[in-house]
Image (cartoon, rainbow, N blue to C red):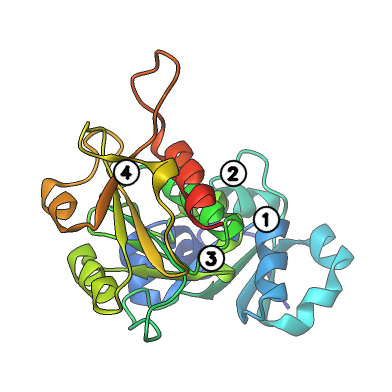
């Protein structure tokens, strides 16, 4: 175990830089902040490259030592510095960054959520977590969406990244892949020509696309879907938050 007391230590500087997409890609690593995420990683059999904790937290949880390649005892100041958390729990872990551009297992099967330019990290993380709860097989994040392994998305996913498949890629290619196996692809659209989501009964394998918070799905993707869905609203609200809409649709479609 190595003890660190300065925020100017090179390890600490590197942990801080993991908040940036560029350094995550360069290093092939990302940071888990807090006990829940660290425990979820251990339960999923994820190797902990670096276990970081305050002295008292490490003393109380020595059972984690056997799961970590390297262990660092740090000050509370360092924990606040690297986690961007107002009241850090005193534990963090660095783990390998999955290859989000790897090829999925073929043929595609199960329920999948595709995100078209969803930019709010909290929305992306919440939808991944909800997809996990709704029994989805995976989530694909399209171009110009929030990064799957940014700190805010990771906190919002609450460990669901260890329970389903996560990818980044060109959604047009993914739509083609689903069509190749005869699976429907559902878009979402506030339009009279769209179909009430309650009237749709997909089979085991399908994809659901959710669009940008303000603009919805791109016109190009809307033209390539099997059917576009809408959620009828009884009240006077103009629209629903995209993560709320996704939750309603995912639980309805994947019964």
Left or right? Give the position of 78 relative to 139.
Answer: right
The answer to which image quadrant residue 62 occupies is bottom right
| Label 3 vs 1, first from the N-terminus | 1
Look at 53% across and 64% down and name the residue there: 31
Q: Which residue is mark 3?
A: 161
Q: Which residue is mark 2?
A: 85
Comparing labels 1 and 4, the label whose residue is closer to the camera: 4
Q: Is residue 249 above or below residue 168?
A: above
Q: Which secondary structure lies at badge 3?
A: helix
Q: Which residue is mark 4?
A: 229
Mark 3 → mark 4, Cα distance in angstroms? 27 Å
Mark 4 burial class by Cα count in 10 Å: few <14, some 14-19, many 20+: many
Q: Position of residue 22 (x, y in %)?
A: 30, 64
Q: Which secondary structure lies at badge 2?
A: loop
Look at 42% across and 70% down and name the residue there: 205
| Label 3 vs 4, first from the N-terminus | 3
Q: For the residues labelled 2 and 1, say whether their Cβ atoms are less than 8 Å apart.
A: yes
Q: For the residues labelled 3 and 2, say whether their Cβ atoms are less than 8 Å apart.
A: no
Comparing labels 3 and 1, the label whose residue is closer to the camera: 3
| Label 2 vs 1, first from the N-terminus | 1
Q: Which secondary structure lies at badge 1?
A: loop
Mark 3 burial class by Cα count in 10 Å: few <14, some 14-19, many 20+: many
| Label 3 vs 2, first from the N-terminus | 2
Look at 54% across and 50% down and name the residue there: 251
Q: Which residue is mark 1?
A: 34
| Label 2 vs 4, first from the N-terminus | 2
Mark 2 burial class by Cα count in 10 Å: few <14, some 14-19, many 20+: few
Q: For the residues labelled 1 and 4, say whether their Cβ atoms are less than 8 Å apart.
A: no
């Amino acid at each position: 175990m190595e003890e660190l007391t300065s925020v100017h230590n090179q390890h600490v500087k590197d942990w801080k830089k993991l908040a940036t997409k560029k350094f995550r890609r360069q290093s092939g690593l990302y940071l888990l902040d807090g006990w829940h995420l660290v425990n979820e990683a251990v339960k999923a059999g994820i190797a902990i490259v670096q276990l970081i904790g305050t002295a008292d937290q490490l003393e109380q949880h020595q059972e984690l030592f056997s799961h970590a390649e390297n262990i660092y005892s740090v000050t509370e100041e360092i924990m606040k510095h690297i986690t961007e958390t107002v009241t850090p729990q005193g534990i963090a872990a660095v783990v390998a960054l999955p290859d989000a551009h790897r090829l999925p297992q073929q043929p595609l099967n199960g329920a999948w959520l595709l995100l078209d330019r969803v930019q709010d990290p909290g929305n992306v993380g919440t939808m991944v977590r909800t997809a996990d709860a709704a029994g989805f097989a995976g989530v694909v994040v399209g171009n110009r969406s929030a990064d799957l392994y940014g700190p805010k998305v990771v906190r919002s996913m609450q460990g669901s990244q260890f329970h389903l498949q996560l990818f980044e890629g060109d959604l047009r290619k993914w739509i083609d892949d689903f069509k190749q196996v005869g699976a429907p692809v559902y878009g979402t659209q506030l339009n009279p020509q769209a179909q009430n989501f309650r009237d749709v009964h997909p089979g085991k394998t399908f994809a659901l696309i959710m669009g940008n918070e303000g603009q919805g799905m791109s016109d190009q993707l809307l033209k390539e879907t099997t059917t576009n869905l809408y959620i009828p609203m009884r009240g006077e609200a103009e629209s629903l938050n995209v993560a709320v809409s996704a939750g309603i649709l995912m639980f309805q479609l994947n019964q």
